Amino acid sequence: MTQHKTLTMMCSFALLLATMPAAAADADAEDAAEARAEARYEAAKDSAERNYKGAMARCDALSGDAEDVCEKDAEVARDAAMSEAKIQLKSDEARADTIEDRMEAEYEAAKARCGSMDGKAEDACVAEAKVKYAQ
């Protein structure tokens, strides 16, 4: 094996090792982002429910049509808050899906670039791409 090929393989291997923690960190960051999104969603639902119960308690002081209207307003406010929480959760999920799609596309492009290499250099390049793009 020539000195150039050996050096190239060593550099590829070193780069692969250097990117491994980054890929793990990306996966951990994605998991943490999903957990935060779910926690925000649950907190928003809890808040909506607490606000609804408080509004319903205030409605108890009323009677007749005023009480009915108050209760309906409380229900509408709760339902609106729940809908907003769902929208935010879906937005967070869509953002995560977009990031995942981009990582897959970048991985495919990296594999295509690796195709111009031969043998072990190509294998190392593909392995590096797998780690870098969490595939």
Image (spheres, rainbow, N blue to C red):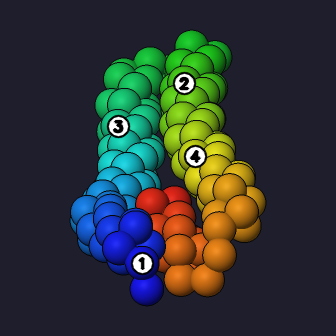
Residue 47 - label: 3
- CA distance separating discs 2 and 3: 11 Å
The residue tagged with tag 3: helix, strand or loop? helix
Hey, what amino acid is under mark 4? Ile
On screen, 12 above or below 119? above
Residue 77 - label: 2
Instruction: Out of 75 and 93, give the one closest to the viewer.
Output: 93
Marker count (numbered): 4
Residue 99 - label: 4
Mark 2 or mark 1, earlier in chain: 1
Mark 4 or mark 3, earlier in chain: 3
- The nearer-to-camera label among 4 and 3 is 4
Which residue appears at 35% of the width and 23% of the height? 58
Mark 3 neighbour density, 10 Å: few (under 14) some (14–19) many (20 or more): some
Mark 4 or mark 1, earlier in chain: 1
Is label 2 in contact with label 3 (beta carbons under 8 Å)? no
- CA distance separating discs 4 and 1: 40 Å
Residue 81 lies, in percent from the top left, at 52, 30
